[in-house]
Amino acid sequence: MGGSRAQVNKPHKTRFSSKSSRNVHKISQKGCRALFNFNGLDLYIYIIMILFSLLRILSVFLNGSLSFGGLDKNRIAKSNRNVTQGARAARLQRSRMLREQKKEALLKEKRASSGSAGPPRVILLFPLSASVNVSSLGEDILRLLSADVGGGLSSTVTSSEYKLRATVLDAPHGDLLSCMEMAKVADLIAFVASATEQSTYDYIDSFGSQCLSVFRSLGLPSTVVFIRDLPTELKRRNDAKKIVTSSLTSEFPEDCKFYPADTKDDLHKFMWLFKEQRLTTPHWRNQRPYLIAQKVDMVPDDSRPEKCTLLLTGYTRAHSLSVNQLVHVSGAGDFQLSRIDIMKDPIPLNARKDHNAMDSDDIQDAEIIRSLAPDPSSQEPLLVENVPDPLAGEQTWPTEAEMAEAERNQKQKRLRKRALPRGTSEYQAAWIVDDTDGEDSGVENDGDDDEDDDGMLLDEGESGFPSQEDTNNPDFEEDQASLHLRDSDEETENDSVMMEGDNMTREQIEDEIKKIKEAHAEDEEFPDEVDTPLDVPARKRFAKYRGLKSFRTSSWDPKESLPPEYARIFVFDNFARTQKHVVAKALKVEQEGRDDCAPVGSFARFYIKEVPFQVASKFCAASRTAPIVLCGLLQHESKMSVLHFSIKKHDSYDAPIKSKEELIFHVGFRQFVARPIFSTDNINSDKHKMERFLHAGRFSMASIYAPISFPPLPLIALKGAAGAGTPAVAAVGSLRSIDPDRIILKKIILTGYPQRVSKLKATVRYMFHNPEDVRWFKPVEVWTKCGRRGRVKEPVGTHGAMKCIFNGGLQQHDTVCMSLYKRAYPKWLEHRFPANV
C-alpha cells in the first residue's frame, strides 16, 4: 500500500533474477566444492567418464562405424518422427501396390471378356409378357452383328465391326426350366417390354413376375431393358419411353438402363455401349468352370448297352477345366471325363472368313489342336457313398487288458459259492448256467413295486431311454422291441401318397390334397399337439420319444442312435478349413496353367463316360429347346452328406409343403431330387425344432441328403405336379452349411384336462388311458397353457387319470401339456437326379 517504504536492494539479491536461479547457484557451488574435495584418483575417473560421453555423442553425429565400449549404431533408437514417417511410407506403398493389382486384374478381366481370347458373351432376351416377340428382336441383333445367321436355339456370331463375339438366347415364354437354365449362364439379361401395354401389370404378366423373382434368387448378372413398339413420332415416342421407364424402374436394379430397340440405329447405339461395358456376374458362378453345349452327341458303348459316352462341345468359361476333374451335367448327375479335345475356334474374332456365324458343320469339321487324357494316378475318383464295413466293429483278437480282466472275472466266479445238487462234480458244475444274478434281481423286483422302476427317464444330460434294470417285465420287453421299428411314427415316416401313388384317381388325389390342407391348418392353430391313441399304449406308440428338462440347455449326444443312412455319408472334421484348402488348391491349379487343363475361352469337346443311354438320348432331343450345361466340380463335391439350406416359401405357391415331401433342388448349376425336413434356426441352442410344414412368410432350415457343395450357392426348390405338368417354384433360398451333427428334434405335446382342482393339486384325465402309461411318463415335467409348471405324482383309478402338483393355483379351464422329443432325419432317396426319374 500507500505507506509502504521502498525496497532496499541488498547485495546478495542483485545477482539473481529469481529465487529458482539462486537455488541453482547454491547447488552448483556445492557441486564445485564437492568436486575440489575429490582426491586425485576420483578426479581422474570423473574426467575419463566425461570424455567417454563426449566420444559417444560425437560418434552419433558423425555416423561413425567404430564401436566404443560396445556401442552399436544399430541399437541407437530413431526419433518418433522418423518412425512415423516410415510407417506412413509403408502404408502408401501398400495402398499403391493394391491399386496396381486391382488395375491389372480389371484389365485382365476386360481383355478376357471382350478380347479374342475370351468366350462369346451370352445375351438372354427375356419377354416380360406373352405379347412380346423376342424372336424378331434376336434376329435383328444377329443381322446387325453378322450377315450370316445360323439356325437353332443359340446362334453364336462374331462381328469385326464391333470387335465382339456374342451368343443370343431367346427365352421361351411359359417354359420355367428353360428360362432358369438360360439365366444361370447369361452374361447379360435383356428384359424386353412392349410400350403398347396400358398399365404396369400389363408390362409384366404373372409368368414374367415369377421368373423375375427366381432370377433375383439366383443372382442377377448385368441387366438392361429393351422397349419395343414405341411410336414413330418423336414427342409421343419420348413420352411413351418415360412412362415405361417410370413404371418398371422399381422392378430392376438401380444400374439397369432402358434402351429403345425398334430400329437398327437403336440397336447400333446399344451395341457400342455393350462392347465397352464391364459385365458383372454372380459370385457363385465364378467359383467353378462351366460350359454351354453348342453341340450334343453320344457314342454308344458296345460292351454295355445301357451306358454310352456323351459328347458336349462348347467354350470353357470362368476357369480352366482339368481332364482329371469331375463334372456335373445339369440334371443327369456327376461323371468322369475320358478325354478332352481342344479344337480350333470355328469363329475367331480376327480371322477373315466368308461367314461369321457358327453352324453345325463348323463344329463338326473343326480341327483338333491337342487331346488331353486323364492320369489314373491323379484323376478324382467318382466316390458318391461311403461303403461301410460290417466287420469294422468286430474284434478278432482280445487285447492284453481284456484278457487280464477276463482272468479276474474267472477267479471271482471260482471263489463265489453256488448252490449245486449233491454229488455234482467240478466238471459238471462248469456246464451249469450261472443265472443266480438274474434270479436275485427278479426276487428284488417282485417284492418291490416301485412306480419309478419302469418309468421314462428324464433327459438331464444322460440318455432318456427306458431303464434296463426291470428286465423281467413283459410290457418293457414289448416296448424295447418297438424301439427297433422304424415306422412306428406314422405321422412323419409314411411316404407321401401323392408322390408314390401314380395310379390314383382324380377323386383320391383331391381327397389327399384336402387332408393335407386340413393338417396344415391344424398345425398352424395347434402346433405339435397330438392325441394319445385309445387302442395302442402310449408307452409303445411314443417309445422313441424322451423328455427334456430344458430344450436349450439339456444335452443330446449327436452320435446317439444314428440311422443306417449315416454310415453311407461323409463328415468333415472342420468344414471351414476344408473349404478354404479346396478353394486354394483350385486357385493354385488355375495359376500354374497345367497341361491337363482346357484354358478359359478355348473351344473344346468333352467326352463324358458312363452316362445312362436314356439320359443321353433325352439330352440330344432337349438340346434344341434348352441349353445343356456342364460344370466342373471341386474336390469332395461328389460325396454324399447332410446339407442345410435357408429356405423360404415362394409367394406364388399356395399349396402346403409337408416335411419329407419330394422336391427338385436347383443348387447353382446342379440339380438333384431330395426329401427335406424343415426346422427352425436357433442361435442360442444346439438343438432345433422340426416343423411339419414349410410356413409362408418366414425363413426355415431345410435339411437333405445330397452331394456336397461348397457355399455360397443359391437354391430354387421346385414341386412336381401330380400329373406330367411343369413343376412350379415352391421355395427359394441359399446353402447355409454342411453338418450331419446338427440336431433336429421333433416335438409332440400330449394334452389333458383338469377334472378336480384343489389348491396346488389337480386330477388330470384324457392325457393317458391306462395307469401303466402314467407310471412310464411320470419323470417328465408337465406344464399348462396359462404358465404353470408341475409334475406327475401318481395314477388315479384304472382309466389313465393322474394326480399332478403345480407351482401355483390351477384354473379349471386350463390345459395340462407334456412335451416329448425325438430326433428327426431327412429321407434317403435312391433316384437323386431329375433326368434319372
Image (tube, helix red, strand yellow):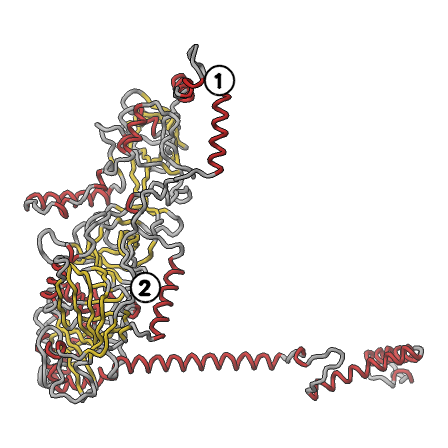
Query: Is residue 184 visible in this depiction of the protein?
Result: yes
Q: Nearer the viewer, residue 77 or 780?
A: 77
Q: Amino acid at mark 1?
A: Lys
Which of the two discs, 2 and 1, labels the residue nearer the N terminus?
2
Q: Nearer the viewer, residue 791 or 368?
A: 368
Query: Is residue 257 visible in this depiction of the protein?
Result: no
- Residue 148 location, x and y as percent? 9, 84
Left or right of 445, for residue 7: right
- Residue 558 location, x and y as percent? 37, 45
Left or right of 619, for residue 392: right
Left or right of 134, for residue 371: right
Residue that label 1 marks: 417
Give the crowd class for mark 2: few <14, some 14-19, many >=20 residues within 10 Å.
few
Dot label at residue 508: none
Give the crowd class for mark 1: few <14, some 14-19, many >=20 residues within 10 Å.
few
Rendered image quadrant of residue 30 = bottom right
Residue that label 2 marks: 377
- Residue 411 location, x and y as percent? 50, 26
Left or right of 339, for residue 480: right
Which quadrant of the figure contains the N terminus? bottom right
Q: Amino acid at mark 2?
A: Ser
Q: Nearer the viewer, residue 514 or 373?
A: 373
Residue at position x 24%, y 45% from top? 692
Q: Secondary structure at mark 1?
A: loop
Rendered image quadrant of residue 52 = bottom right
Relative to 525, say whether 93 is above or below.
below
